[in-house]
Image (cartoon, rainbow, N blue to C red):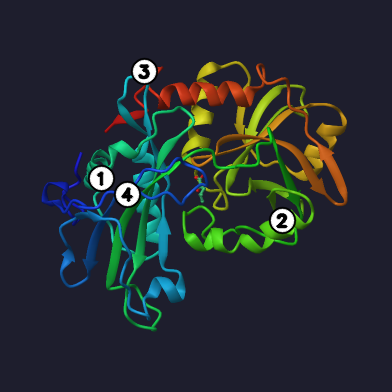
Amino acid sequence: MADASVPSFKAADLVIELSSTPKNKQDEVTFGNNFTDHMLTVDWSASEGWQAPLIKPFGNLSLHPACSSLHYGIQLFEGLKAFRGDDNQLRLFRPMLNMSRMSNTAKRACLPAFDQSEFLECIRRLVEIDQDWVPHSDSGSLYIRPTFLGTEQSLGIKKPAHALLYVILCRVGSYFNSGAESLSLWADPKYTRAWKGGTGNYKMGGNYGCSLFAQYEAEDHGCQQVLWLYGEDHQITEAGTMNIFLHWINEDGEEELATPPLDGIILPGVTRQSILELTRKWGEFKVTERYLTMSQLCSALKQLRVKGVFGSGTACLICPIGHIVYQGENLHVPCQDKKSQLASRIAKELTDIKYGRTASDWTFLV
Ligand code: COI
């Protein structure tokens, strides 16, 4: 439902310029390189407001060298996917959650508001135009990357009076190409992904760019990703670019699926929320948003109370964690055999929804 109180562009005003040179559609090999034929752009200025949205051939942007997103990181992004079901219908998964998170991030970044439903309808039209790019396989999908930039042409640090909202699409396969069944994490409190009062709960590029240095140090320690810790008590917060879940027998002897609470340093992931809602609906074990520390995890590992640890995110869906390197020790995290593993069960239920095998109001038809 459009919200008339927010000054916004309208999907009904879309201008469409189709590409006359469609590209060959390569298979999805590496995540994030295989872009489709079209993109959506919408310009905004404080003096003229939103311009008509435009779908045009995919191509470079032209930006002023003083552009505020380049100098001060006044920018944000989102990530969601389109899936081709067995019935050939294209579906998005809970896209309004991305629209709402994007609006929250835009506010935090001092970028202008837009109508979420109008924007989603523009995205739907873009995906429809590039629909042949959505893979005919249930290991592939079309990754949708909405992006919002401050395009103020000034080195002054101020709220941008010019901004550019755009969306690009790319055909993707699996996010981690390692072929391994589980990930290894390096946990060291010397790096912090996010802090109270910061921007860790918003989807801003800076959160990811700043994580790279630690990511390469993780690789030097033989690990694939960083387990981000926080505070003196080494709270477990996120894994790489993913939310993290611990499935264990807790200190009170109860079976529990736990993930850190949304206290300002955790990204409110759409997959995270879906896992919480799904497993709460099952009602088979306790599902909690709570603080978890490395010392709690280490004790539970020693006492064989851990059933599994996994990361979740749009790009990877669910990724089991097999090892954690922490304070000089290589901790082995048990993964139950593949079929009974909770991570596999959740991944299957979510995949069945995304590909239309299970009817659900979590999907949005393209
Ligand atoms: C996601 O999985 O949701 C992500 O944001 C990963 C992306 C940075 C590639």
Local SS, label 2: loop
Q: Tell me residue 237's x, y (percent).
A: 65, 47
Q: Residue at x 53, y 22 (%)?
A: 348
Quadrant housing residue 362: top left
The amino acid type found where label 3 is placed reads Ala
* Badge 2 density bin: few <14, some 14–19, many ≥20, Cα 10 Å: few
User: Which residue is the site of mark 4?
Assistant: 23
Depth check, front residue: 35 or 124: 35
Residue in the image at 42% along x and 36% along y: 141
Q: From the viewer's perspective, tell me whether residue 66 is left or right of residue 282.
A: left
Which element carries disc 4, helix, strand or loop? loop
**Considering depth in this image, is 179 or 304 the residue closer to the camera?**
179
Disc on res. 283 = none
User: Which of disc 2 and disc 4 is earlier in sequence?
Assistant: 4
| Above or below for 219 versus 356 | below
Residue at the disc numbered 3: 359
Counting residues from the start of the chain, the first of labels 1 and 3 encountered is: 1
